[in-house]
Image (cartoon, grey):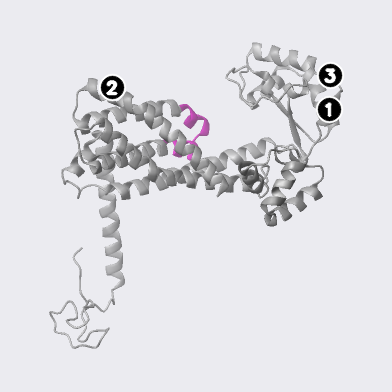
Amino acid sequence: MSKVFRKSDVCLNCDTPLRPDDNYCPHCGQENNTHKIPVKHIVLETFEDFFHFDTKLWNTIKTTFARPGKITVDYLEGKRARYVPPVKFYIFISFIFFLLLGKLSDHAIDGSNKKRSGVKNLEQTASITLNELLGNKKIYYSSDSSEVRLVGLEFTSIDNLQQQLKRLKTAPDRVIDSLLASEDIDTSKVSREKLRKMLSLIPESGKVFEKAKPAYVVYNKIRFETKEEYEQFKEDVRDYSDEQVDSLLRSKGETVNWFNRQMLKKLAKFDMKNKDDIKELTHAILKSISLTMFIMMPLTAILLLLIFYRRKYYYEHLIFSIHIHTIFFLILSFVLAIQVFVSDSFGEKLWLWVFLICLIYLVLSLKHNYLQSWRKTIMKFLLMAVPYLFISLLLTFFAVLYGFLA
């Protein structure tokens, strides 16, 4: 839409007389426009801008999927008017991606909270694994899909824990399968037999049960026996000096160092059994990860410059990097939308296929953008895969850590 000047006889800024053909004041340079714009004009201008953006967005998305790599080639050749600018396109799609990712994490937290809704007072519960009940150390992870020692039980008292164990020892297969499934362990005959055998080895009483009592855990060995002590600590720790935090770490048998000090300060502010606190922490981490992408894209461009060195100008690789990350977010947003609005279980089944599609799309884009043979393209793709994976994991780690500490 061409600009329409609604003119005045005098400059509204400095009162200089103006001629009918003066679009700007010759004295102060202010635009000769009364800004008394009819509502009709505002509505038409708004719709024109919207559909103008919508047309560019549609052209960008259509070309993106129909011809991988073409929007980068066109942009570098100066054919830019038909597409959404790379940075604007990235910001628009990444906003949708992280919004959907936040929604999905909220749903997962709410679902996890519902699974534990049978416990009346979550603040006074504790958990213990079967391996700990046998007097061994806690196991946090195993690559064995039938590792039943990882199975944990939540309880409100020692009597409550002993009653659960007694029921499980004679429980039918469906109850055992439900317990295994809650821990993401295979619900096979082998797993059931392993679990039943382990349950039979757990004594009905002993020192383990004496130690297994609910407590208000803040961080590792930092725990309190009563709610009053816990609440008082959470209120006081905000004003603790580093010396006071270190003193508390020593008194509880924790190593005194910067990391433990920061972890204690931050975890003291959150109740990890409160879904609102967990959501707040998750959103902070996701925000931190979204910001690291502004580091990831330039680093990827450097990697492309080193591997596809025939293109000497850095900005060419940067445009490709921005486009490819935007497209990845666009594809992943599609699956996230299915999980959030259609079916979570169906969406989960799509992730493997989506990652394969992203890899294939990247190879096709590299081929069409850098115009090298398939053999060279695939070799260079494999060459950049390892450092790219390392950089992305490293940045994600620091993003999670920064998001938590910040």
Q: Are marks 2 and 1 in contact (CB under 8 Å)?
A: no
Rendering coords of residue 405 (x, y %):
57, 47
Provide residue 361's location: percent of width, then percent of height: 31, 30
The circle drawn on residue 379 is: 2
Q: Residue at x 27, y 64 (%)?
A: 44
In the image, residue 277 lies in the stretch drawn in magenta? no
| Secondary structure that dominates the magenta span | helix
- In-front residue for pair 35/145: 145
| Mark number displayed over residue 209 | 1
- Residue displayed at 70% across by 20% down: 176
Direction from residue 130 to residue 147 in the image, left or right: left
Q: Amino acid at mark 3?
A: Pro
Task: Indicate the amino acid at tag 1.
Answer: Phe
Q: Quadrant of the N terminus?
A: bottom left
Residue 203's tag is 3
Q: Name above or below for residue 390 compared with residue 50.
A: above
In the depicted structure, whether residue 321 falls above or below residue 23: above
Q: Crowdedness of circle 1 by 10 Å Cα count: few (<14), some, many (20+)?
A: some
Q: Residue at x 24, y 47 (%)?
A: 83
Q: CA distance from mark 1 to mark 3?
A: 9 Å
Asked if the residue under mark 3 is in contact with the one under mark 2, i.e. CB atoms within 8 Å, the reply is no
Q: Where is residue 57 shown, x and y percent of the image?
A: 28, 47
Q: Which sits earlier in the primary sequence, circle 2 or circle 3?
A: 3
The answer to which of marks 2 and 1 sits earlier in the sequence is 1
Is disc 2 surrounded by few (<14), some (14 to 19) or many (20+) residues within 10 Å? few
Residue 2: assigned label: none
| Kind of element beneath mark 2 | helix
The amino acid on which the numbered mark 2 sits, given as a three-letter code, is Met
Residue range highlighted in magenta? 335-349
- Residue 170 appearing in the image: no
Camera-side residue: 157 or 62? 157
Displayed quadrant of residue 136: top right
